[in-house]
Image (cartoon, rainbow, N blue to C red):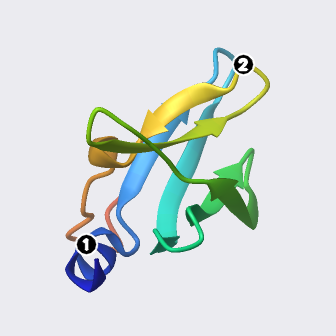
Amino acid sequence: MEEMRKKLYLSEFIYHNGTHSVVMNIVDICTVKNEIAVAVTDEGKPSVRKFDLKIEDGRFYFEFGMSREQISVDEFEQVDDQFATRTV
């Protein structure tokens, strides 16, 4: 588990909710408590939120937003250049 935490730390996922993009970065994963902490930047407003970590068919995910969209941990990617300019 520790290896997975290190590998995914600050990895990024951009979620498009239909009107704008939400940038997410994994801060922590705890399989003992079944929770994931994610830094969420929504319309330029950053916050750290905790979600229930779920597993289905060997895939870790959490539910996000009003529609409870399943966001798979596998969809997050490492960001090599922390100063890279991104179009969101």
The answer to whether residue 41 is above or below residue 48 is: above
Residue underneath mark 2: 67
Name of the residue lying farthest toward the top: 18
Q: Amino acid at mark 1?
A: Met
- In the visual, does 32 lie left or right of 64? left
Residue at (33% x, 77% y) in the render: 5
The 10 Å Cα crowd at callout 2, few under 14, some 14 to 19, many 20 or more, is few
Does the image show residue 40? yes
Where 21 sits versus 30, above or below?
Answer: above
Q: Is residue 36 or residue 83 the one in the foreground? A: 36
Label 1 crowd (10 A; few <14 / some 14-19 / many >=20): few
Is residue 88 shown to the viewer in this render? no
Res 11 → quadrant: bottom left
Q: Position of residue 70 (x, y in %)?
A: 52, 29
Residue at 48% over, 36% down: 71
**Which circle's residue, 2 or 1, is located before the other in the chain?**
1
> Which label was assigned to residue 35?
none
Q: Residue 57: which quarter of the image? A: top left
Indicate the position of residue 85 as horizontal and vertical percent values: 37, 57
Identify the amino acid type marked 2: Ser
Q: Position of residue 24 (x, y in %)?
A: 53, 53
Q: How many marks?
A: 2
Residue depicted at 47% across the width and 65% down the height:
26
Q: Which quadrant: the N terminus?
A: bottom left
Per the image, the residue denoted by label 1 is 4
Residue 81 point in image, percent of width and height: 24, 71
